[in-house]
């Protein structure tokens, strides 16, 4: 019972890169997507702010 709970918790958690499971390509891909989306949002926000000024 405890094992499945631990797995559920770790699935919902955002990992730092050093915590990445190198054997799980899906996890790596999702993490990379998350990082790319954050960077894209930052760039978009900066461009919008520059246009307003």
Image (cartoon, rainbow, N blue to C red):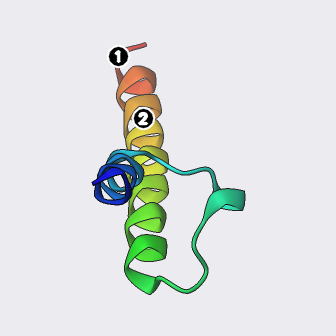
Q: Which residue is mark 2?
A: 47
Tell which residue pokes out farthest to the right in this image.
Answer: 18
- SS state under label 2: helix
Cβ atoms at labels 2 and 1 below 8 Å apart: no
Residue at 42% in and 75% down: 29
Q: Residue 40: x and y, percent?
A: 41, 50
Q: Residue 25: x and y, percent?
A: 45, 85
The residue lying toward the viewer, choosing from 44 and 23, is 23
The residue lying toward the viewer, choosing from 29 and 52, is 29
Query: Could you tell whether 40 is left or right of 16 in the image?
Result: left
Which quarter of the image is occupied by the C terminus?
top left
Q: Residue 4: x and y, percent?
A: 29, 59
Q: Residue 12: x and y, percent?
A: 32, 47
Classed neighbour count for the residue bearing mark 2: other residues with Cα under 10 Å, few (<14), some (14–19), many (≥20): few
- SS state under label 1: helix
Label disc, if present, on residue 19 of the rendered structure: none
Earlier-in-chain disc, 2 versus 1 = 2
Which quarter of the image is occupied by the N terminus?
bottom left
Residue at 49% in and 74% down: 28
Tell which residue pokes out farthest to the front in this image.
Answer: 1
Residue at 37% in and 59% down: 3
The Cα–Cα distance between marks 2 and 1, rounded to whole angstroms, is 9 Å
Query: Could you tell whether 33 is left or right of 22 in the image?
Result: left
Q: Which residue is mark 1?
A: 52
Count of labels in the image:
2
As displayed, is residue 42 above or below residue 29? above
Residue at 41% in and 45% down: 13
Say which quarter of the image contains residue 11.
bottom left
């Amino acid at each position: 019972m405890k094992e499945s709970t631990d797995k559920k918790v770790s699935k919902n958690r955002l990992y730092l890169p050093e915590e990445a499971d190198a054997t799980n390509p899906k996890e790596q891909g999702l993490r990379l997507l998350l990082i790319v989306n954050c960077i894209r949002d930052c760039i978009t926000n900066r461009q919008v702010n520059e246009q307003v000024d």
